[in-house]
Amino acid sequence: MYCNVGQAGTVETGPGALRCELGAVDAVETPQVERTFVLRNSSKEPVVIERVQSSCGCTSALVGPANASGKPMAQTIQPGAEIPLKVALSVTHLNPGFTNKFVWVYVKGDVRPSATID
């Protein structure tokens, strides 16, 4: 799985790993920060994204549309195809200063994350 985004402050830190530097964020002016990343299937077989997990409750992530119950559906990505991953970070309740938050993308058949966004 390959993840990339053409936004300032984003660097690839390894295969399937991406770091997004937000800089200083004023929680009053910007209570929530949103970024959309692109996940690309760099394998030769279709992959199924089974779940996306965030490191805490202040971070949420969504791949594709939700089903009727409001839960995200598993998404199949064909070889070479791309799909957006929308990540939102609520900064209102975070303590001032430096913080790290993570989002992990898991595909069917792999117990380790296929993509990590820091």
Image: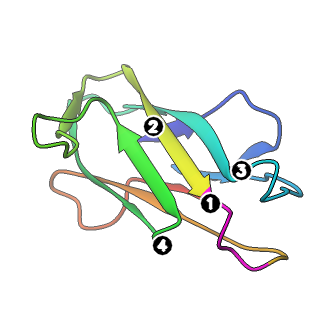
Contact (CB < 8 A) between labels 3 and 1?
A: yes
Residue 20's disc number:
3
Q: How far is disc 3 from disc 1 in space, using C-alphas?
A: 6 Å
Whether the magenta-drawn stretch holds residue 94 is answered as: yes
> In the displayed structure, does residue 69 sit left or right of residue 79?
left
Q: Amino acid at mark 2?
A: Leu
Q: How far is disc 2 from disc 1 in space, using C-alphas?
A: 13 Å
Q: Residue furthest left?
A: 68
Q: Quadrant of the N terminus?
A: top left
Contact (CB < 8 A) between labels 2 and 4?
A: no
Residue 56's disc number:
4
Q: Amino acid at mark 1?
A: Asp
Q: Where in the figure is residue 57, as x and y percent of width and height?
A: 45, 69
Q: Earlier in the sequence, mark 1 or mark 4?
A: 4
Q: How far is disc 1 from disc 4 in space, using C-alphas?
A: 12 Å
Task: Identify the magenta region.
Answer: 90-95
> In the displayed structure, does residue 8 sit left or right of residue 57?
right
Q: Earlier in the sequence, mark 4 or mark 3?
A: 3
Q: Residue at x 14, y 35 (%)?
A: 67
Q: Which residue is mark 2?
A: 85
Vertical comparison of 18 with 118: above or below: above
Find residue 104 and report its image quarter: bottom left
Give SS at disc 3: strand
Q: Residue at x 11, y 43 (%)?
A: 69
Q: Which residue is mark 1?
A: 118
